[in-house]
Amino acid sequence: MPFTVKALQKTGPDQPFQITDIERRDPRPDDVVIDIKAAGICHSDIHTIRNEWGEAHFPLTVGHEIAGVVEAVGENVTDWKVGDRVGVGCMVNSCGKCEECRAGQEQACVEGNIGTYNAIDVDETVTQGGYAQKVVVNEKFVLRIPDALDFDVAAPLLCAGITSYAPLARWGAGELKDGKPKQVAVLGLGGLGHMGVKIAAAMGAEVTVLSRTRKKEQLAIDMGAARMLATEEEDFFADHRGEFDLILNTISADIPVDRYLSLLKPRGVFAVVGLPPEKQPFGFGSVIGGNKVIAGSNIGGIAETQEMLDFCAEHGIAADIEVVDAREVDAAYDRVVAGEVFFRAVIDTSTLASA
């Protein structure tokens, strides 16, 4: 039977979050019911629920950084059992049959993957996310959280972690070049950027953080960066022309793309994971000269996300977080947008019951 759980929900982009009851589906034979222990706040949640990426399906519960414990499994489930430590990321289903799904790239499903929230599910209902007590998910989209990772610091890995890990792995951040570590720059030291620094450094890259100022320099170094450079300093782009093999752009704001491309070595890669609301212009000459690459990256498939979780556990990597009460999420959103959260806010979902 369908059942109800407490959840944070908005009825419109300008409305405050309310703690209310939402319905979860009657678990199917291939479903897993998860008791949610922590839910990360992703900037994508904010963009979505504020209608900055188009009209959302209200009323809506967001959240796609979910960590918890298996509470029940369907009769056909074989990979999961009650008590398992698990997570759910940005997807809860895909066609499973197309070329991309068969290749383990469910996020690029030709039929369109089904997002954890604000998407139309197979039963035509709107998916509701992880700012809730429980969630019901198809077993193939459940991930194992290693024992070395606490729930609250693991939750942001389900989006921020894989979003950073996938392009770094794809473009060989950990490979040697002429016997030396690759020069990797991470543009922005926020929720995504701080994960990019930790992961790239653990892979073996020499990491430079690019930010407008050096305000967070010691934080960046403590995370594994070799240095931080301030992009607003005079002659910055001239002084650092052609230094980097790979730049991971994690910021969701307007930037002078051509000038950042000038920082790449020949055959260098500018990997984009930050999605600003406005289009970003650049000249083809900036990539043709030097055979450079601009590459987008959208999370990762289920297998790669599990690979990322295992990598983080092995290397002692976790998100830097602050835990917030369910009643503090509106204020937390404003602080995230203002850049005042170091570096991810995570909701203690147990506070839903007492609110």
Image: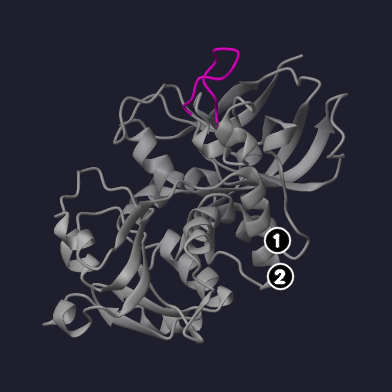
Identify whether 72 is placed above or below 273. above
Pick the residue in front: 243 or 123.
243
Identify whether 321 is placed above or below 201. above
Q: Are marks 2 and 1 in contact (CB under 8 Å)?
A: yes
The disc placed on residue 314 is 2
The amino acid on which the numbered mark 1 sits, given as a three-letter code, is Asp
Q: Is residue 209 left or right of residue 132?
A: left
Residue 289's x, y, as percent? 19, 65
Q: Is residue 87 left or right of residue 157?
A: right
Q: Which residues are magenta?
A: 118-131
The amino acid on which the numbered mark 2 sits, given as a three-letter code, is Glu
The answer to whether residue 214 shows anywhere in this view is no
Secondary element under disc 1, as helix, strand or loop, is helix
Q: Quadrant of the N terminus?
A: top right
The disc placed on residue 278 is none
The answer to whether residue 269 shows anywhere in this view is yes
Residue 258 in which image quadrant: bottom left
